[in-house]
Amino acid sequence: MSYPAYMEESIRKVEATRERRLEEELPRIPVGERMPVLEGFHPDFIASGMRELLIGPNKGERTPNELATLLEGNSCINPDKIDLNKIDYDVDVLVIGAGGAGASAALLAYESGVNVLLVTKLRLGDANTVGFQGGTQAADRPEDSPARHYLDTVGGARFTNDPKLVEALVKDAPDAIRWLERLGVNWDKKPDGSMAEVALAGESVPRCHCARDYTGVEVMRVLRDEVRCRNIDYVEFAPAIELIMDDKGQVAGAILVNLETNELILVRAKAVIMATGGIGRLHIQGYPTTNHYGATADGLVLAYRVGCPLVDIDTMQYHPTCAAYPQQVLGLLVTEKVRGLGAQVVNINGEQFANPLEPRDVLAACIIQECKERGKGVTTPTGEVGVWLDSPMIDIVRGAGTVAQNLPAMVRQFGRFNIDIAREPMLIYPGLHYQNGGIKFSPDGSTPIPGLFAAGECEGGVHGKNRLGGNSTLDIFVFGRRAGGTAAKYAKKAKPGTLTLDHVRRWQADLKKLGLDKLRPISPMLLPNYARQPYDYLSEYTKQMLAAGQIKIC
Amino acid sequence: MAKSTQMVDIYIMGKHYRAPEGLTILTALEYCGYRLIRGCGCRAAFCGACATVYNLKNDPRLRYALACQKTVEQGMYLTQIPFFPASKPDYDLEKMEPTGEQILKIYPELITCFGCNNCTKTCPQDLTVMEFMSDALRGDIPGVVDKSFDCVMCGLCAARCPQGIVPYNIALLCRRLYGRYLAPASKHLEDRIAEIEAGKFDAEIEEMEKMGIEELRRLFDERKILPK
């Protein structure tokens, strides 16, 4: 085994308490009593981590410093240099982002008979969707109901969700599952055809549909294949860097950039669906993230700049169980399914300190408290701290082979570093996982800005201030499909005006008035910069351009 | 960390660099100053973007890995294959049958497999690729589904196939056929969709939408946790 000897010592204590813990179930904290632990230890409540926005539709509202800086950022284009008559693509519906939400939206818009273009920053399907393991919620069992799903969802979020969005989420859920199955997604089933569902944190009944723990991979490879089979046009390595408006105040397209050549690509569209996903690569408060390389909040920045308000951007989701060891996979998502199958969370002495199925915000806060306040975490050789996720309990409770059958990705990923999770626990700590809020939108996928639609992680309101496991992957299919259908319908009746970038000119003028133009970077960020580049010889301006990916050296 | 970090010698496209041991190939590339656009995706072994070929100084045999998962070793020669063209015919799943004949109709080159097993040897997920290609050839679709399920479609198997077979796309077709036609139907799912369409839950949900937070909170805290 590959844990250092001193960590093995703590594992012996975990093993020693295991038999007793099999009978031990800690009570869940009632919803009204969650605030002390959240306010004390959840990163959202660290005052210095947030600040008020100085400009834009959410001016005066608080959001993490890292996001605020990008929302207040400079456009990288000079509107005077762009000829809006030279259009590269002229389509009915433009979908920005090709993860689960974008692909679902593109497929539904295509089915409605309109001309669709799907564009993405990296490859088709390179998105947080591929990383989801635990599954997708849908209340389809006889003992369950959409009403119960509704109550679990709003309770998990401390009643901060938009009720109409939750209603759409829970009522569309079973149909979304069936839609995916008809496209050829293999959900885990029992021999009689009934779904093999697990309960994730905060769920009052097993409701999560999985495909082993490669659920996101399974769904994304099917959606990607379907997009290709239908010959839906898509452009890869071409992120959007600005939206185009028209003189009637409608969103009317986007400016993309070829990531490798810096060539601009102009798209005119009657409707634009924002499906750019999440934010994890901003590493808010320095947290490691479970997110995809491209998760840099681009859609929020672009929507904000055309005047679209954002909601619930004062909360981020920190997934309670991300790998703290080995260092090579620091921040790797350890699916909630591990807890759903019966693993407890225990400290250095093998003691439980929280119910493993608390909602994510609560459990994350409890783990941080256990490590930071009580000092009962295990410190790794590289200085990370974490607590144990006692995965060997799963085979004990559910029978030998359960781990291997249900968690092959986890087995493989830890196995690569000689850790057998069926026999030894995993060391975990919270990591930045999900953007709870985002672009303000309605159940039909429309936003307050005509011509702009939103779906998936970049929108907000569905999950309020804390999302339940299995609801984001549901969100992308439910609202991806809704946005696709609505945008297509809108595009058929749209009356486009003359294209303009005046909104960019106004934005830059407003930034200048506040003196922010000199203080803020270029946004959207597009990609994080992890390259160790000792470019001390560069001017500040050049460094900033380099960091924003706007220029290349050599 | 008490002791100073050991450095290892690696070669990126033949050029020599030194990187701290313990980094993955992906993070070592970044340490060496590369800002990645190609060959980097989820960074967690799910997306298949970072398929990598490498060998070691003094050992010319090619080895295969996902760059986000493999730790750098002394003397590694690194190459990434971010894109490899592979056949992907269009098809309409709704007009297909879940049979071996159907698979061969879409991917006729499958029959030319002569069992060199290079595909299995290259798979960074350690899947038995040649075995499930044999299953596909025999029309054993459930066999393909089970053995190929953990495929991340990195493309390495196709890159090494001397016959131009694309195992990852063939397996995808088999899985889609299984999910669409062979998986046993979920009656409870169909029943629930019909109930929702008939408006069975509308009143209950609407009532909750109108409730004050105190009332909702009481309802939430009193809800029964099933099965226990």
Image: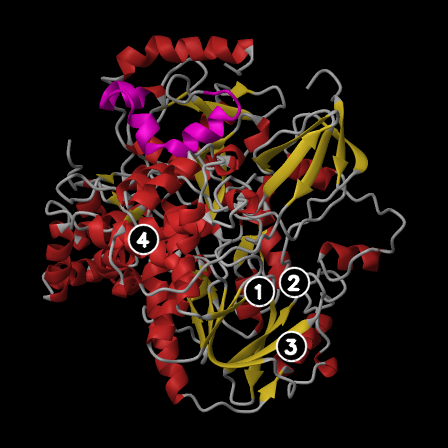
Determine whether label 1 and label 2 are within 8 Å by CB.
Answer: yes
Amino acid type, callout 2: Ser
Q: Is residue A349 above or below residue A271?
A: above
Would you say residue B193 is visible in this rendering?
yes
Q: Which mark is drawn over residue A301?
A: 1
Residue range highlighted in magenta: A393-419
Which of marks 2 and 1 precedes in the sequence? 1
Eye-nearest disc, 4 or 2? 4
From the viewer's perspective, is A489 left or right of A1? left
Q: Is residue A82 above or below residue B103?
A: below
Residue at 52% from the left image edge and 28% from the top image edge: A324
Amino acid type, callout 3: Val
Amino acid type, callout 1: Val
Residue nearest the viewer, comparing A436 with A128: A128
Residue nearest the viewer, comparing A411 with B199: A411
- Measure how far apart labels 4 and 1 are at the Cα level: 37 Å
In the rendered view of the protein, which quadrant contains the C terminus of chain A?
bottom right
Residue at 80% from the left image edge and 34% from the top image edge: B17
Asked if marks 3 and 1 fall on the same chain, the answer is yes
Asked if marks 3 and 2 fall on the same chain, the answer is yes
Quick one: SS at disc 4?
Answer: helix
**Residue denoted by label 4:** B176
Which of marks 2 and 3 precedes in the sequence? 3
Q: Is residue A208 above or below residue A378?
A: below
**Residue denoted by label 2:** A523
User: Residue farthest to the right?
Assistant: A537
For disc 4, the chain is: B
Quadrant of the image occupied by residue B228? top left
**Residue denoted by label 3:** A504
- Measure how far apart labels 3 and 4 are at the Cα level: 45 Å
Q: Position of residue A404 (x, y in %)?
A: 34, 27
